[in-house]
Structure formats: structure tokens, C-alpha cells
Image (cartoon, helix red, strand yellow):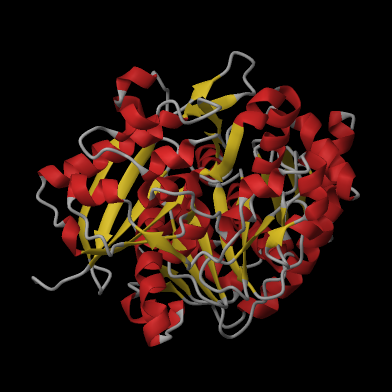
Amino acid sequence: MDNEQFYLGFDFSTQSLKVVAVNDHFDVIIEESIKFDDIGKYKTSDGCHINPDGLTVTSPTIMWVDALDIVLGRLLQKGFNFQAVKAISGAGQQHGSVYWKKGAEKVLASLNPSSTLETQLKHCFTLEESPIWMDSSTKKQCKYLEAAVGGSQAMTDLTGSRAYERFTGNQILKVIQNYPEIYQQTERISLVSSFAASLLRGAYCQIDESDGSGMNLMNIKLRDWDETLAKACSPDLQDKLGIPVPTVTVQGSISKYFVERYSFSDTCQIVSFTGDNPSSLAGMKLAKGEVAVSLGSSDVLFLWLENPLAKTEGHIFVNPVDTKAYMALLCFKNGSLTRAAIRDKYAHSDWSHFETLLLNQPRGNNGKIGFYYTIAEIIPDGVEGCYYFDETDQQVEDFADAEHIRAVIESQFLSRRVHAEDMGFELGKDCRVLATGGASNNHAILQVMSDIFNAPVYTQSVANSAALGAAMLAMHAVNVTTDNLSYKERVHDTRNFELVAQPQPDSKQVYDVMAARYRKLEKQAIELHRKQSGQ
């Protein structure tokens, strides 16, 4: 135990800062966290400030700095052995941005260990409030940058996503246009991830490629800033962003401040921090041929892609653990809340009754397909309402109760499958589905998912997947140059998955036909919504 080495993973999320330490076997040794709202002097609600306009949403930059000292202080009080930490990485909420004032790097490099980070860095930012992912105030900038490259599909082809108001490139352009004096005083622009790494490094850390590909500024094929987009913002923007680097990059040794204040070893390495979604992919140990499905209030799909197809309704990022691959993220608003609404209406608000009806109704629902958008959907964008079709593809007014139960689950997973395939995901013999989130404990629902994807479904219990993924990336980065293992080879033996469902023998035959019909009927549902809403 005296020779045991640890790896720290931080997660600077919207509401809190978490940290986990793992050993060489990925066993979690210790965890700690702080909710930002509990640091009362910043007067945040759920970690942020919402402007009266309802569009502008920010977080105090110095609050994140303060939280780092608080969390490390708590580990110190618990007697954690900082000297044994070999490497550190982290995750940051995607799309947040930090604006360093000219001269800030000199302050970072000369921090006094007898004083707090907050005291010494509170005047180092030209914007005291960092725009975060909840901000939706940059519609004008989105239109401007899309026009610069030829429209939304061209932007998607280039950067992996159409222009989104929360994405950092559009947020930076807003600062440039609305506050030119602040931009001129800014020495460096970081993402939340590279900002946090910079604190620990005591120098500016580069933005990693995976988090950087969520900015609407990076050419995801070249893995570098797109010159047209960067210059459309400002001629000197690339200088203020630095050079994007692979996620598994050692950026240097830890700052002297942390060595002297917390007794870290001066050989402790700072590995690139990345976004929370890429880090979660690493924490879930997703591999080629697999899809992770998070079944929550919204359903989110993480896909490992080799040859992605850019679609304006999804996101493609550079893969954090394989520089030749990509990851896609698809978010569907109608997830568990919609499933619960249909349960309440047609199964007496009883999950047990819901499961009985679902299992007793035949696979394929006798050809009936329903669309259940109880709230405005993201994929397909903005569609709302419920639409029902019989086995001849004719619209009908209603289904029987059991048909509704089977239809809502089948339609949701047909949607996940169809849109995953549209992004370039290939179903095949090596396909596996990894299920997480609240509904992943419902075996009847998972069986339908297994049948529709024609793939085995596994569940995994991964707490703090972003922080855990960061710790695992830190471990991988500092060892890969000596043992030459791939990330998959390194983590494969530690994957604690439980097989919970296997496809029925006739699943492919039933659901290949249903998927083809679903594609056609989804277009009809979109048209019906447009007619009803007068679009």
C-alpha cells in the first residue's frame, strides 16, 4: 500500500465540483465534492445566475477557483496522501468559457501557497461571469457564423454540429461584438475544462480536441480551428485560443503552489481536461461497436463512430480515447417523463401494470406505430403532439391501452436506433447496448430495447462517470508511452457490466421492417405537427 499510486479526476459540473481518486486497478479510493450554492457569497441558484432576460446565464468564474481550494482542503482534512498522486485530469461542463486578463498567466505562475487561490486570482478575469451551456442569448451570432461557412448543414459538416446558442464560438463572438474593450484586454480564452487544468498547472493549458469540437469553431476532421470561422470572429482569435491537442496529452507538471500547500509530488502530471460528455464516455468505458443509452428525464445516446455522418439534429465530437475515431451525442427530450405520462394515462399510474401490458402485447404491436411528443422534441426538432398509425400506415385517432404502452416504448427505441444509424452507427454482431439511468432497472423496457437494436443490453452502475472517466484518462495518459496499451486494452478487464437482456430470435425480422416504416411515418408526424401549428 505504501507504494500505491493514485490518479485524481475532477468534474467541474454546473452545480458542483467533484473529485475522485483511483488506484492502478481503477478502484475508487476517496471521493469529495462541494455544491456551488453552498459557497453562499456567490448567491448562485443551481450553480448559476440567470439574467432577468431569461436568456443570459452565467456562473462566477472565481467561484470555480474557490471551490478547488475547498475540495482539496477537505481531502487534506481526511488525511489523503497527495504525495501518491501520479497524475490529474478532469472534466468541465461543456460550452462554458473563461476570459483571462492580460498578465494573468504571470500571476498563475507565481502563486503564494500561504494564501488562497480565490484571493490571488480574483482580478485575473476580464469577464467576472462566465457564459455557460444554459445561455441562449446568441441567436444573432449563430446566424452570422453559419452564413460565414454556407449555412447550417455546412457548419454541421465542418464542426460536427449546427450553430447552437450555447456553443462557445458563438459566445465568444458575442463578447467580441458587444464588449470589444473586454475582448482586447483578454490574453487567453479557455473552456471550463482547460481553465481548470490551467489552475493546477500554473500556466495556460491547451484546449483538448474532444471538448474543443463542441465550440462551432473546430474542423473535426483536421482537429484544428477552422480559419474561416475563427477569422469571422476576430483575426487574432486563434492566438487567444492556443493550439488544440489530443485529450490524452500530458500538459506538464503540477504548479508549485499545490506542491507546497497540499504536499503533491512535484512530479505529478497534469493531463488535458475535457468536457463532461467525452469524460463520461471514458468513464463508461465505451468501445467500438457499442452505444450507451442514458434513460433519464431526457434520453441521451453516446455513440462510438468510425465514419460519422453529420446531421443538424445531433452532435459529433472528436473521440477522447481514440484520435482516429469520433463520438456522437443524441439527446431526446421525451424520455422517462413521457414514459411516465403514458403509464399514468393507460396503466393506472402503476409500473407493474405497465410492464404486464408491455410484455403481453406482441413484438411489433401488430404493426401499430405511435409518436409521443408530450413536450417539444429535440430530435426531430420542435415537434410536439401524439400521432398514431395502423398497420397500413394510415393515421388513426386512438389505440387500445396495451397498444399505447407497447407503442410508446417501441417508438422511442425505434427513434434512437434510426437516428443513431443516420449518424453512421452500424448495427452488427459486435453491437452492444450499455444502459444507464433511472429506467435501466426496468427489465421489460430493456428487453424491447434489446429487440429493437438486435443486440444484448448490459447495465452498469457508474457513479460520477465524468470524474471517474477523468481519473482513468489521467492514468492512461501517463502510462501509454511506456506500455503502449490502447484505452480499451487498459480498461477492458475492469468493466463491471451485467447482461440483462438478449434479443428474441425474430427481433431482426420484426424490427428491420418497423424501422423502415418508422422513418417514413416520422416524416408524416412532422408534417402533421407543422400543419397543426400553422408552420
Q: Quadrant of the C terminus?
A: top right
Q: Is residue 209 visible from the viewing direction of this image?
A: yes
Name the residue rendered at 31%, 20% in the picture. Answer: 40
* Residue 460 located left or right of residue 182: left
x, y (%) of residue 525?
A: 81, 47
Q: Quadrant of residue 169?
A: top right
* Residue 145 located left or right of residue 455: right
Question: Residue 271, relative to residue 175: is it above or below?
Answer: below
Q: Nearer the viewer, residue 457 or 96?
A: 96
* Residue 128 located left or right of residue 232: left
x, y (%) of residue 142?
A: 78, 37
Question: Residue 288, relative to residue 186: is it above or below?
Answer: below
Q: Is residue 529 visible from the viewing direction of this image?
A: no
Number of numbered markers = 0
* Residue 1 located left or right of residue 202: left
Q: Nearer the viewer, residue 3 or 215?
A: 3
x, y (%) of residue 315?
A: 67, 55
Name the residue rendered at 72%, 50% in the picture. Answer: 217
Name the residue rendered at 55%, 39% in the picture. Answer: 96
x, y (%) of residue 309?
A: 76, 66
Q: Quadrant of the N terminus?
A: bottom left
Q: Identify the residue at the far top of this view.
A: 52
Question: Residue 217, relative to residue 458: is it above or below?
Answer: above
Q: Nearer the viewer, residue 111 or 471?
A: 111
